[in-house]
Amino acid sequence: PMQNPHAPITELYVSADSAQKLKVEAASLPSWDLTPRQICDLELLMNGGFNPLKGFLGKDDYDSVVETMRLADGSLWPMPITLDISQDFADTVEPGQDIALRDQEGVILAILSISDKYVPNKAREAEMVFGADDLAHPAVNYLHHVAGPVYLGGAITGIQQPIHYDFRARRDTPNELRAYFRKLGWRKVVAFQTRNPLHRAHQELTFRAARESQANLLIHPVVGMTKPGDVDHFTRVRCYEAVLDKYPAATTTMSLLNLAMRMAGPREAVWHGLIRKNHGVTHFIVGRDHAGPGKNSAGEDFYGPYDAQDLFREHEEEMGITMVDFKHMVWVQERAQYEPMDEIKDKDEVTILNISGTELRRRLSEGLEIPEWFSFPEVVAELRKTRPPRAKQGFTVFLTGLSGSGKSTVANALMVKLMEMGGRPVTLLDGDVVRKHLSSELGFSKEHRDINIRRIGYVASEITKNGGIAICAPIAPYTATRRAVREMIEAYGAFVEIHVATSLEECERRDRKGLYKLAREGKIKEFTGISDPYEAPTNAELVLDTEGTEVDYCAQQVLLKLESMGLVAA
Ligand code: PPS
């Protein structure tokens, strides 16, 4: 049934007067602090972006969506929109109750009337929705490691929109977009979904899509949550604004969508289509590997390159939005223009050029040339600002090893050498220094050591983010904790793990602080190597053997490693 794309869509908000009253009443309800992803979902539930959903899925709808891509009443809906909560909170609420849903500052956004409380079969959800119960899939990882164990379902009463302070003029609800299209007389609109900066090839394909469908063009980038590791949305929106100037203003517009993507390929494409339809759009571009999550743990693609187009096509009529399939655009050097790969008849006679996302990242991180045929100078300039070459980025050197292994000595020598070179500020987070200034209340139990290392990781990640060099030198005896720190840092820059592999015998023979003697006598408990574990790294960037090697030489080896990684200029 083709609904009128210009008529307003049902929102879940109450009137402004009632909202004020409800907010006061809701203050005394049990309340749940929404996660960033839940806030994204709630916004699209309330503003009609997820129409026909009226709230978070109850058990019947959830099972039905997981198994059949449909709500229990049969309407097409491919993505489980669920409110996952902790076991502790689950123990305090029951179906029949109302709860307040708050943002991260505590502002009440909505009331949930709980109809269902259930424990999902996450392995099944992963298998059916994402195609495999494989942690290499970001949404499966989220499902198992971030999402709570219990889901609440029920209708939402919307009190207010989540607050955004950034790019407010560029955000539109479905009804705002519908009204805009109506006002401008745009009867046909083709939407382009994206989570990446736009380059010339994208511009060309969107032009073509608009021409082919004789429609106006909506650039509709996702600014909620995208794939971990993507270019941040602040940078992207500045890039989009630069590119938008190169489109005819009379036929093209841009609006930001606060969607939390799941990278679910085919199901995600159908979901994206339904969301766009709710925004008053009539045509939707689906590309090669639409919303693809990358490789699985066996190194293969999760979905076939055209699975998303196939699934969309199957449901196109029922959805009431037309698919415009993506042309893979490539640069034909001889003709100095972009052409769809599948329409080039003389492939053997011309030079076909293309720069992949991986290649683009490599060029940015090494400060190499990015040709004009590939992107716009304004876009490249923005990207260079956020992704300066590695030799100008912050990074963390993390030395791990037994007490007395020589971590601090090497760390000090390295710090001085880096300061001699200049260019970036250097901070040394030595084990003893940290225990004095950051962790003075902590002891040496596993729990306390983990807290200590995570604090070091947090400080180092902030230093790295701000373009400095952090040198850490704790024992850090646990592999899992070191990995967690690596993840924190790698969001902002390189993490260089160095195992100072001096043997226990040698450390004990040196016994520079006299601690090993005390540990042997049982006067110090839980002493690493004697009465407490040390899990040696197996994937360190560098292993240092300090026995019979001068400190100066060890520090040199680290510098050479940094140089080979491009972190210091050769
Ligand atoms: S950890 O495990 O990473 O949190 O340890 P760290 O913060 O690096 O602290 C290690 C320094 O504390 C002294 N010390 C001990 N080390 C290990 N085990 C026990 N039980 C212990 N008690 C005190 C020791 O001097 C360590 O300093 P370094 O520089 O490593 O020799």
Image: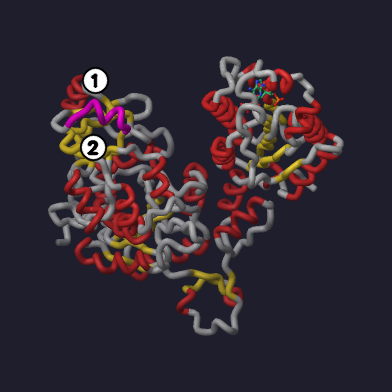
Q: Residue at x 50, y 49 (%)?
A: 230
Q: Residue at x 42, y 39 (%)?
A: 167
The tag earlier along the polypeptide, 2 or 1, is 1
Residue 542 visible to the viewer:
yes
Residue 135: percent from left, percent from top: 44, 50
Numbered range of the magenta stretch: 86-94
Residue 65: percent from left, percent from top: 23, 53
Residue most toward the front? 521
Which of 379 and 49 lies nearest the eye of the viewer? 49
Per the image, the residue denoted by label 2 is: 152
Q: Amino acid at mark 2?
A: Leu
What secondary structure is found at the residue carrying circle 2?
strand
Q: Amino acid at mark 1?
A: Ala
Q: Is residue 30 above or below residue 200?
A: above
Per the image, the residue denoted by label 1 is: 27
Which quadrant contains ligand 1?
top right
Q: Is residue 362 above or below residue 411?
A: below
Q: Is residue 4 above or below residue 526?
A: below
Residue 391: percent from left, percent from top: 71, 44
Q: Is residue 89 magenta?
A: yes
In this rendering, which labeled residue sits more in front, label 2 or label 1?
2
